[in-house]
Image (spheres, rainbow, N blue to C red):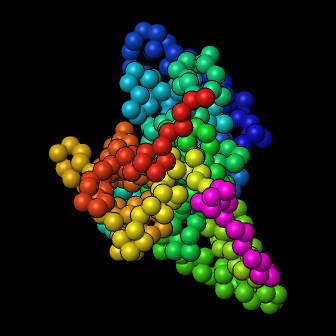
Amino acid sequence: MSGLTAPAAWTAKTKRTLDAVRAAMAGNTERTFTAHWTEDAVRDQLLELVGSKCWYCETLILRADVNVDHFRPKSKVLDVPGHQGYWWLAYEVSNYRVACKHCNSGGARFNGVPEGLAKGTQFPLLAGTRARHPRDDLSLEQPLLLDPARRGDPDLLGFDTAGHARRSNAPYSQAETDIGLCRADETIRILALNDSQIIKQRSHLMQEVGVLARLGDAPGVQQLIDAKVGPQAQWSSAAAAALALQRACNRPFAAPAKPATTPGGTPVIDPARSKVDLQDLLEHLDPDDLEAGITLTGRHDKKVHHATLNSEGQIEVLGRPWRTPTTAARAATGSNKIDGWEFWRLTIAGMEQTLADFRAKHFPPIAPA
């Protein structure tokens, strides 16, 4: 993105439009954003980076309109009352991301049911101070959504062999720990990165790459692999993950490292992970109950929602697995403002309790020094 430059004529035209927007705001009249971002002068530069594919879900955009998304929304920000949008970035090329219709404005489905609100005007913050004026420092914002154009963000996404997008093995950041949210899970939910068709196609692609990788040095094999993992290929990140997995399987076996333990022999609980997901708390649940699936319930707007906690620490909601309680609760209710630890309840030995109560019992808060 740093190498992109807007043509002088396009820049002059957008300045006039932005001046009109500024004048409308000063006069308290309706603003009009002319869609200069759809013009070839800029869009073609974006498409040259990784081809005609969505930067969010990596689906090829064929025989359909290529949407240019504003990463920071230009006219308003969902769930942020009074925010007039990042209007001053409406014509900043660095704020543009190529997006398919589903990621930009919705329409993705899971088992026939509409899924997610899509990116649209959503721009939640994980932490930091939200910018509201051109003079504000954007670097003080910590976006919740993963940014495909920001170094390090794509590395937080991983893929399982069934084709599901999930969080990679990267540790949670301090900001994620502080509010109990996983950036990858929330991005997957909002952009519907695990809609039914993508899961099936990703899984098939990963199987293909695995088979090709096992063929070794057969003539033409590497060329076929390169075509699937190259940056312009559809779902290339999933293909690259499958290739890395197969190559890891081909390495000589090495004994796995023993899990870290305290002097008393108890596995060390990761304070960060224990505040975001359930992985480290599974040992306190009955293995047989987990194998069968532990029922979770939650109530929102006078409706009771049901989910199942499985043996991998995933919360299954409407047929979809989530690794974090809050994202699972938001997927169930459609609300962006629910704390899943307080929302979900489970019953142990006849006693109903929230996941927050369960966590506090086995992972009590550390008293300040």
Q: Is residue 255 magenta?
A: yes
Residue found 61% across the figure and 29% down from its top? 369
Could you say where residue 286 lies in the image, as x and y percent from the top left?
Answer: 40, 68
| The N terminus - image quarter | top right
Residue 265 in picture, x, y percent from top left = 63, 62
Q: Quadrant of residue 107?
A: bottom left
**Direction front: furthest residue:** 264
Quarter of the image where one finds residue 197: bottom left
Residue 202 position in % (x across, y down): 54, 71
Question: Can I make out residue 255 in this image?
Answer: yes
| Above or below for 3 versus 224 | above
Question: Which secondary structure class fits the magenta region best?
Answer: loop
* Stretch of the chain drawn in magenta: 251-266
Q: In this view, does 307 lie to the left or right of 209?
A: left
State the residue at coordinates (49%, 12%). Answer: 23
Q: In this view, does 283 lie above or below 68?
A: below
Asked if residue 11 is positioned above or below residue 315 in the image, the reply reads above
Numbered label tally:
0
Q: Nearer the viewer, residue 260 or 329?
A: 260
The answer to whether residue 226 is above or below residue 50 is: below
- Residue at image x 44%, y 37%? 121
